[in-house]
Structure formats: C-alpha cells, structure tokens
Image (cartoon, rainbow, N blue to C red):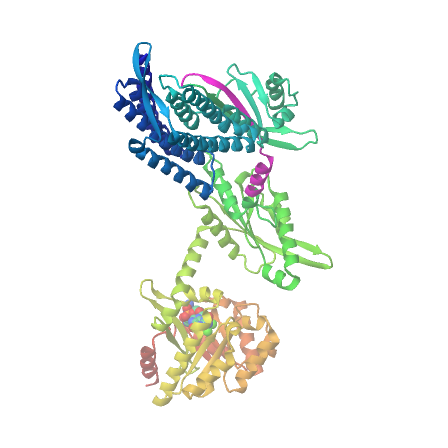
Amino acid sequence: MRIEFTIIFSLLVIILTVCTISSMNSRKIIGKSVAFFVCSIIPPVIGNLIIVCAKDKFPAMLGYYIYFLGMDVVMYAMLRFTVRYCRIKRPNKILEYGVYALLTADVIQYAFNPVFHQAFDTEPIMYEGDLYFRLIPKLGQTYHRIVDYAIFTIVLLLFLIKSIRSVRIYAERYLIILLALVVGGVWETFYIFSRTPIDRSMIGFAVVGILVYFFALYYRPLRLLDRMLAGMASEMPEALYFFDDNGLCIWANDRGIKLADINDDDYAQAESRLTELFGDLNIKDDEWSAEKELKTEQGTTKYYVLEKHTVPYSESKIAGSFLSIRDNTDEHMALRREIYNATHDALTGLYTKEHFYDCISKEIQKDNDKHYAVVYINVNNFKMINDVFGSSFGDHVLKEIAKRIRECCHENSIYGRIVGDIFGMFMPVDEFDDAMIEEALGHFTVTEGHMSHNILIHMGVYFIPDKSIEISVMFDRARIAVTQIKDDYKICLAYYDDKMREQVLWDQHISSQLNEAISKKHIRPYLQPIVDTAGKPIGAEALSRWIHPTDGFLSPARFIPVIERNGMIAEVDKYMWKCACEILAKWKKEGREQFISVNISPKDFYFMDVVSVIKNLVEKYEIEPKKLRIEITETVMMDDNENRIAILNEFKQAGFIVEMDDFGSGYSSLNMLQDMPVDVIKIDMGFLNRSELDEKGQKILHNILNMTSDLGIISLTEGVETTEQYSMLLNMGCRLFQGYHFAKPMPLEELESWFDSVTK
Ligand code: C2E
Ligand code: CA
Ligand code: CA
C-alpha cells in the first residue's frame, strides 16, 4: 500500500507543478491566482506523502506539520482565487482581515504544539503488516478544522451566490467549479473523519486544484458561445445563410428567411430561391463577392452586396461556409448622387468644367482619326443682365442656354458649363453645323414673368489640329476667336486662326510692359513738322514711338490699337501731352513761335476728364493754350455726340485750337462740319487714293477745301509726299501741310535743327 500511495502522491506533485508553471505562463488575468492556488496545494500533498512514508514518529510529525500549515496557505490562496474568479469587486474588509487573523492564530497555535501538545499527536498503528503513524486530533486541531471549514464554506457560498445571480448561460462557469470543490471537500472530509490508518485526504484537494486549473483557464463554455453567436447572427443587418461542408443550407437568420422567402424549417430551399432572385450564384464556390441588382414589385431597383466565406475546421478541412447578403441600396444611391453632384453643375445640370474636360480627354484619347472642334460659348453682357434683371432672371437665362445647347448637340457631342456664363461644346467636325448652332444659340429672347430680354451669344470655334494640345488651351483659343467678334450684332460665331493667337500674345506682351516703358522713357514723342503755304514751319504733331529694348523701334500701329482696346492708351496720351507741354515751355523760353498738336484717343474720354487734365497741364507749364493744339478724330463724335460737342466748346472757350483728325477716313459727313466747333480739319491723303488722284478725287478734295474755307475752317492736308501733290493742294487753296515731302516725324533735337535750317 505504501508504495502505491507514494507513487500517487508523487504523481500529483508532478502534475500540480506542471499546472502551476502552465498557469503562471497563461496570458489570462486569472492565471496568477490559479497558479498560486494550485502551487499552494503542493506542500500539503508533500506533507501527506511524508506521512504515508514515515516509519518513525518524527518524520510523521513533520509531515503533519507541513500538511496542516500548508492547508492554511491553501485556504488563503483559495479565497484569493475565489474573489478574483467571481469578480468580487469590493470584498468585505472585516471578513477579509478576520480570515487572515484566524489563519495566523492557527499557525501560531501549531507553533506551540511541540511544547504544549494541544493541537495533535500521532500514534503508531499496524496496517496490512506495515507501520503507520495515525493522527490523534486534539483541541487545537479542532480549531484548525473549524477555521479551514469556515473558509471553505465561505468559498462555496461565494460560488453558489454567483451562480444563482448570473444569467443561466454564465452560471455554468461558477457551477462547474462549485461542483469540483464540493466533490473535493466531501472526499477530504470523509478521510479526515474516518480516521483510516493511511491519510489520503489530500488526493481530493489535489484533484480540485487540477480541475480548477482546467476550468478556470481552458474550459470554454461552448453553449454560451453558441448562444451568443446565434444571437449576433440573428441581429445582423445582413441576410445570412450557413452551409454545411456539402454546400447544403443548414441555417438562415430571420432576414435571410425573409429575403429568400423560405420556411424556417426548410433551409435547404434557400439555394434555389436565391438563384431565382439573383441568377446563378456559384453558391458551391468557396470565397467570392458580388454586387447584384433586384427589381422590386413596385418597379424600383434595390442593390445588394453578396459575400461568401468559408469557415475552416482544420488546415485542410472546412467546417462549412456562409453567405451574407447586404442591402446596399442607400449607399449605392448616395454614391450615385455624390458622383452626379460632383460631375454636374447644380443650376443647369450640365457637366462641370472638370468633368467636361475629363470626358473630352477620354474621347480624344480614343484611337481614331476623327477630327474635332470645340466651341466656346459666352453670353454677351451677362453681368448687365444680372444687374438689371436680378440674378434669378440671370439663372433662368443660363438654364435656357443649357436647354438650347442640349437640343443642338448630337449624340457624339460633349458639352458643359465652364464657369459663370461660359459654356463649352466638343464634337467631331462632321457633326459641327455652324448654321444650326447659330440658329439655336445666336440670339433669342428669354421671358420670365413680365421680364423679357434679348440674349446675344458670342461663340468661338477652334478646330483641333493636334490631339496633344491641352484642353484648356483649346478653349482659350476658341475664346480668342470670340474676342474678334467685338460689337458686330450680326456676327455671333467666329473661328480661331493662328494670327489671332499671335495677336493675343503680342497684346499681353505690350500691355505688361507699358508702364515700365513710360517710366523708362522707352516711349517718347517724335515730332513731324507742319508748314504753311510758304513752306514755313509753323508747328509740329507729336507722335509716339516706342524704342523697345528687345523688339526695336515700334511704330504706333504696333501698340496704339492694342492699348486702345484695354484702355491703357490714356496713360500714354497723358504722358505725351505732358512731353508736349515741356517742349512748348522750353520753346517759349527760346523764343520759338511754333505750336504742337497732340492726339486724343476716343478712349481717353472714358478714363479721365480730358479737358481739365489738359487745362491743368498748360497752367502748370505756363504756356498759351493756343500753342497746344488738340487733335481729335471724327469717331470721337460718333458716340455721345452732344456731350462731345460740349467738350470741344470747353476747349475752344479755354483758348485751345481744336483740329479734326483723319477727316474723310471714317463715316464722316460733310454736314457734320456744320455742328462741329473745330478750327482746323486734317484731311487724310490716304482716303483720296493717295499718289495718283483721279479726276473724281480731285473734285471731292477741291470741294472739301472750298467748303472749309467758306465755313471759316482752316484746312490741313497730311500725308503729302510729292511736289505735285503739294502744288496741286496749293492751287486748290489748302492752307497747311504735313507729310514726308517736308519731313518725317523725328526726335526733338532733329526737329529743332530742321526748323532752324528751313527758316534761315
Ligand atoms: P495720325 O494722327 O493720323 O498721324 C499721322 C500719321 O501719318 C503718322 O503715323 C505719320 O507718321 C504718318 N505720316 C505723316 N506723313 C506721312 C506721309 O507723307 N506718308 C505716309 N505714308 N504717312 C505719313 P504714325 O506716327 O505711325 O501714327 C499713326 C497713328 O497712330 C496716328 O495717326 C495716330 O492716330 C496714332 N498715334 C500716334 N501717336 C499717338 C499718340 O501718342 N496718342 C494717340 N492717341 N494716338 C497716336
Ligand atoms: Ca493726328
Ligand atoms: Ca491723321
């Protein structure tokens, strides 16, 4: 018997040691408490082992000491484990310290046992021919038993309460350990009180330790997991179908049952029903996902995302698979809306610029040898429409344009709103129909409520010669074509050519450098003499020249029209008037009698009060107003006739001499002279066919000269190039002359020496 028990106890010690090490290494929070508890059982088991092996009283006594003291530690460890395992957050402090006190008292009373023999003693007994030492319990031992049983009872109570209070599926965790403790406790009690010669009570506790180790660390309450997973699967927003390893549907959640319209005891139907709904789904395949549409009975479309996953059982086997079907309609629609909003203009519903350009670039990249055209569409005076009729009417106009663009485009055309009142079209050249586009978009009337307005649209067309040109550049070029339309009401469509591009680049080049050119005196006056009938120089006209550092000598034709378009001419003119005044002031000092004529552009009147600017100049330089002659072209009188006449009168009243420039080159009529308060008219030789004047031209010239002298207006002919012209004009009664025949425009110093050489 002794050998068998020695083997059993030794085995238990080894198993408990392994369990201790394993629970020490466990990652679970409870691991340490389990380790302590299991480890605490080892000493009493060793105590038991010594008792069983002892053939002498002394080792038997030692064994009992180890056993009993060890049991105190076991109780302490068991209580600690229970508090942790049952998650008792705030253990009762009095109870806790009470327990510690009782245990400490027990240890102390054992310490006195060798002296007072009040706890226990041993007696030798013979059993199956062997000598064993059996316990003789005394008062102290009774105390020990009361304390240990009390703690044990508390532990049992705690587990009991916890298992009653917990939800049934969780109670399992506590009940199972409670059961192990009860069995272990009963075993222990039986052997303690039966007073068998061989004490085997610790076998029960060792088994309890091993069971606790297993249940606390490795037992997974499967029923609990089952319940939780099933609950979750039912609550999932997706329809779920579980298939076994043969691909047969074995379960579906409520949504799944509803979607496939099957009975909940007939899951096997699911596959065929789903195939009816979504078409062939390859349900047998392991892992896949797909998006499917479903037409509802109400005629709407629903969108679903289907995903199939396998559930692995081991590395090579699968336990089954499941299919989830999610109603994706809301997200799908939201995404579609988002894409639509991002690619379409909210007001007109046309493509936004970015999307428009994207679509064009995709079309262009297609490998074909089609030729394409872009059309740039701009509403004339849209700002005015907005200001006068209000932005709501403006919006209405834009919508009407969008509608018309849609109507006149073929299926291969792409169109969009570029920005504000600017739209664009892109189409294969063979679909480009200028007459139709002009008809649809050129001009039309928009009416809203009682408001009605004629809309004029300007369009520029660019035929794309090379598909590698950037799309924004294509539209820039089409836009340049629009700028050529100007104010012609009959024309609403213009075509781009390369000269336009050069012109625009030149315009930008000139405009960006103009201010610097003035300040650095790269722009300066050249003066062309004006002579009387005797050939005597009586004055000069100031004409601007730009001595450009890189482009060289620029005549006014190169830059005046450019800066007249953007209004910068006013800066040049002001500067030229100032230069003229400086020269006149100098001449005054030097005793020269000549006057200087300066040019005034019609555009100047839009940017300044021309009269007061010039008046201020002559006052500042203290020169007689009659020395600064004012040249205005007849086009000045074209718009705002009355106001301009008033301006001319102001000049005259202030003592200036007013000359009408380029007479005959425009739409001038002779009776205009009647109303115009001018002192001098400058007749342009160019308008009379220049060099060889025919009979008819001579007659006209003669008549003009006669009439001017009748009206008391002095006549000046410019562009006189030959002696013949000069003598003919002299005979016709012309009073003043200007032209290359006398001298070309020249810098001030040259002019002064020319004057001096002629008058000598
Ligand atoms: P414009 O006022 O009619 O000036 C006369 C133009 O005729 C000058 O050209 C002059 O050089 C040119 N000319 C003079 N005699 C002859 C001739 O015998 N034969 C030929 N073929 N041409 C002759 P330019 O200097 O090139 O100026 C051209 C136009 O530019 C001027 O015409 C004037 O309208 C404008 N312009 C020039 N400078 C200014 C300026 O500072 N301000 C403004 N607003 N316009 C200016
Ligand atoms: Ca002039
Ligand atoms: Ca002229």
Provide residue 739's location: percent of width, then percent of height: 41, 73
Which residue is pictured at 29% across the width and 31% down the height? Answer: 114
Residue placed most toward the observer, 81 or 54 = 54
Check the image and name the residue furthest to the top.
Answer: 129
Provide residue 66's location: percent of width, then percent of height: 31, 28
Which residue is pictured at 49% across the width and 64% down the height? Answer: 565
Magenta span includes 310 = no
Task: Write the start and end of the magenta stretch as one range.
Answer: 315-339
Is residue 440 left or right of 728 when viewed as pictured? right
Q: Quadrant of the C terminus?
A: bottom left
Q: Quadrant of the N terminus?
A: top left
Magenta span includes 325 = yes
In the rendered view, tell whether residue 95 sits above or below residue 489: above
Residue placed most toward the observer, 512 or 24 = 24
Is residue 176 left or right of 267 when viewed as pictured? left
Residue 678 seen anywhere in this rendered image of the structure: yes
Is residue 610 left or right of 544 when viewed as pictured? right
In the rendered view, tell whether residue 29 sits above or below residue 347: above
In the rendered view, tell whether residue 401 sits above or below residue 217: below
Provide residue 80's location: percent of width, then percent of height: 41, 35
**Residue 112 picture quarter:** top left
Q: How many marks?
A: 0
